[in-house]
C-alpha cells in the first residue's frame, strides 16, 4: 500500500469515527440546552418534572457542586448521590454526569464563567441527522507548514457564535505558516488540551461548506515542521446543535482559495 493509499484508508476510518462521535450521547447532535452556573443553588431547568427534578447545582471552584437524590445519577459509570463535585470538562471529554436519559457536563471557555451543557438521548436532531457531506479525499490538500512557537502561551481575545461569549480568551502557543494556492498565511491555532485547533474560513465557506467556517485539529508540533491535512477539516459543533457557542475564524485564518477537502456540512432528513 502506498503512502497516499494508507493516508486515504486512515481518513476513511476517521470519517466513520466522526459520524459515530456526533451520534453519541454526549455528542454534538444530542445537546439540547445549556444553563449558566452561579454561586447560588439552582435546579436544572431541563430536568423539571422527571425523576431528577430535585437535583440542585451551584458553581464551585473547580467546576460544579451537585446535590443528588439517591438512585438518579451516575458519574463516569458509577452511582453517586448526595453532595458530588464535578470538575470542568477536560479535552478527553470527561467527566460526564448521567441523569436518566440525560447527560451533563460542566463547560468553561476559559476557566472563569461556567455552564451546564445538557444532552438528551431523545434529542430530535438524532433522528433528523442523515450524515455529513464530505469532499472526496485529495492528497493535494495535505500541506506542509512551519510551526513558530511563541516564547509563552498568549491569551488572545476571540470571537464566538454566541455574541455574549465574544472576548473570552483562547490560549495561542504559536503560529502555523503555510502557502495556500499562492496566499501566504500565518495561521492562529489555539490549544485544546495538548492538541491545536485551527478555525478557518475559505473560498467554499457559505456557498459549499458550513458557515462561518470549519475546524482542523492537529498535534502540537515538537519541532518547526507541521502538516495541515485539510482532508480532516470538520464541521464545528454549532453545525449540529444551535446550543453550542463556537469560536469564529479570526482574520488571520481566512483563506482566499476554495479548500475543497474535509467535511462540508451536516445533512438533515426532511421533516
Image: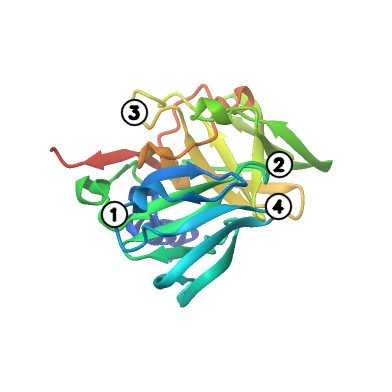
Q: Residue 239, labelled with which disc?
A: none
Q: Are marks 3 and 2 in contact (CB under 8 Å)?
A: no
Q: Real-space Cα distance between discs 2 and 4? A: 16 Å
On the image, the x and y values in percent for residue 190 come to 65, 42
| Front disc: 3 or 1 | 1
Upstream in sequence: badge 2 or badge 1: 1
On the image, the x and y values in percent for residue 219 come to 63, 54
131 left or right of 152 in image: left
Residue at the extreme right: 151
On the image, the x and y values in percent for residue 243 come to 40, 39
Q: Real-space Cα distance between discs 3 and 1? A: 43 Å
| Front disc: 2 or 4 | 2
Q: Are marks 3 and 4 in contact (CB under 8 Å)?
A: no
The quarter of the image holding the N terminus is bottom left
| Disc 2 residue crowd, few under 14, some 14–19, many 20+, Cα 10 Å | some
Q: Are marks 3 and 1 in contact (CB under 8 Å)?
A: no
Residue on which the image places disc 2: 171
65 left or right of 133 in image: right
Residue on which the image places disc 1: 49
The quarter of the image holding the C terminus is top left
Upstream in sequence: badge 3 or badge 4: 3
Upstream in sequence: badge 4 or badge 1: 1
Q: Secondary structure at mark 2?
A: strand
**Residue 225 seen in the current view:** yes
| Front disc: 3 or 2 | 2
120 or 10, nearer to the observer: 120
| Disc 4 residue crowd, few under 14, some 14–19, many 20+, Cα 10 Å | some
Residue on which the image places disc 3: 208
Upstream in sequence: badge 3 or badge 2: 2
Residue on which the image places disc 4: 221
**Residue 137 seen in the current view:** no
Residue at the extreme left: 271
Amino acid at each position: 500500500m502506498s503512502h497516499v493509499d494508507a493516508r486515504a484508508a486512515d481518513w476513511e476510518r476517521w470519517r466513520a469515527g466522526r459520524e459515530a462521535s456526533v451520534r453519541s450521547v454526549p455528542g454534538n447532535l444530542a445537546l439540547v440546552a445549556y444553563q449558566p452556573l452561579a454561586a447560588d443553588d439552582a435546579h436544572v431547568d431541563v430536568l423539571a418534572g422527571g425523576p431528577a427534578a430535585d437535583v440542585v447545582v451551584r458553581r464551585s471552584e473547580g467546576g460544579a457542586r451537585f446535590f443528588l437524590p439517591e438512585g438518579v445519577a451516575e458519574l463516569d459509570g458509577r452511582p453517586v448521590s448526595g453532595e458530588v463535585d464535578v470538575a470542568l470538562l477536560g479535552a478527553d471529554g470527561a467527566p460526564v454526569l448521567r441523569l436518566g436519559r440525560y447527560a451533563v457536563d460542566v463547560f468553561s471557555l476559559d476557566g472563569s464563567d461556567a455552564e451546564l451543557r445538557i444532552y438528551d438521548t431523545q434529542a430530535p436532531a438524532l433522528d433528523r441527522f442523515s450524515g455529513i457531506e464530505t469532499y472526496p479525499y485529495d492528497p493535494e490538500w495535505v500541506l506542509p507548514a512551519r510551526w513558530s512557537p511563541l516564547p509563552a502561551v498568549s491569551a488572545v481575545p476571540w470571537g464566538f457564535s454566541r455574541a455574549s461569549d465574544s472576548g473570552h480568551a483562547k490560549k495561542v502557543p504559536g503560529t502555523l505558516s503555510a502557502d495556500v494556492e499562492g496566499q501566504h498565511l500565518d495561521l492562529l491555532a489555539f490549544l485544546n488540551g495538548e492538541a491545536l485547533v485551527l478555525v478557518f474560513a475559505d473560498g467554499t465557506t457559505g456557498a459549499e461548506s458550513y458557515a462561518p467556517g470549519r475546524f482542523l485539529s492537529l498535534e502540537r508540533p515538537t519541532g518547526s515542521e507541521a502538516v495541515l491535512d485539510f482532508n480532516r477539516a470538520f464541521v464545528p459543533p454549532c453545525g449540529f446543535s444551535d446550543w453550542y457557542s463556537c469560536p469564529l475564524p479570526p482574520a488571520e485564518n481566512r483563506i482566499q482559495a476554495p479548500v475543497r477537502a474535509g467535511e462540508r456540512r451536516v445533512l438533515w432528513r426532511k421533516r
